[in-house]
Amino acid sequence: MAKINLELKKFGMRSWVVLAVVGVRIFRRWGEIGLIWPEALLVLAGWAVGYFLSDLDDWIYVLVTHPHELTSRRVWDLLSLGKWGAAREMLMSTREERERLPIHNALTGLVVSGVGLWVISSSGSPLGWGVTLGLSVRLWWGLVMEKNYQKWYWLVARKINLVEHKVLAGVWGVLIALQIVLLIRG
């Protein structure tokens, strides 16, 4: 039960951004209330999709790229018994073991944030807005909270020092802030 509460707490900490954006958009367009609710629901649905897209790399790591590792074999065993919830819980509790993830890296995060700016400014898809913002925020939060930040730079040929890491995290944060501003301005 404690693990579930911790996961819900993390989800809540990462979700306040989209709730604030949707709340402000609803408040600003209160006169168009019949039009804003479907848009708000699509942004929230996109947020959920983007949020859980970042879990894909754990599944790819375990099921495709590293099926020989002990954790991978345990997850396979749970899946073969039909225990999907236990398999996901094992993935989440052993996440720190995995390195060189295809989605949890600085390059993917910056690209998603850049694409997010383009999607928000150029498309009329509230679902797309939510997906890119949800994935960007979840990845950025993971980068900021990671104790071993070097795991995020495995695509870079050299070690990234702490100053470079902080600059990249700051630039990435600015890209996310621009996405938020664009969404609020509507």
Image (cartoon, rainbow, N blue to C red):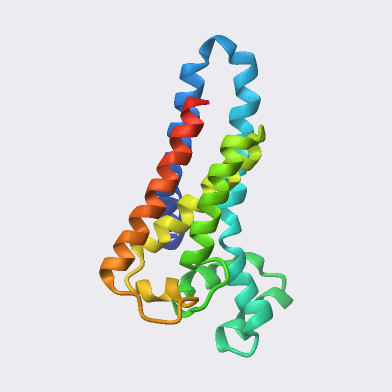
Say which of 156 and 75 sits in front.
156
Say which of 1 and 14 sits in front.
14
Image coordinates of residue 29 in percent, x first then y, are: 52, 16
Q: Is residue 28 left or right of residue 32?
A: left
Image coordinates of residue 4 in percent, x first then y, are: 46, 58
Give the total number of marks visible in the rendering.
0
Q: Quick one: quadrant of the N terminus? A: bottom left
Relative vertical location of residue 17 with respect to residue 11 in this rendering, above or below: above
Say which of 145 and 162 sits in front.
162
Image coordinates of residue 57 in percent, x first then y, are: 59, 69
Relative vertical location of residue 20 with respect to residue 96 in this rendering, above or below: above
Can residue 143 be seen by looking at this rendering? yes
Q: Is residue 119 left or right of residue 15?
A: right
Q: Residue at x 61, y 32 (%)?
A: 41
Image coordinates of residue 173 in percent, x first then y, are: 38, 50
Q: Residue at x 48, y 72 (%)?
A: 95
Residue at the extreme left: 163
Can residue 77 be seen by looking at this rendering? no
Q: Is residue 172 left or right of residue 31?
A: left
Quadrant of the rendered image containing residue 58: bottom right
Q: Residue at x 58, y 51 (%)?
A: 50
Relative vertical location of residue 131 with respect to residue 155 in this rendering, above or below: above
Q: Residue at x 62, y 65 (%)?
A: 56
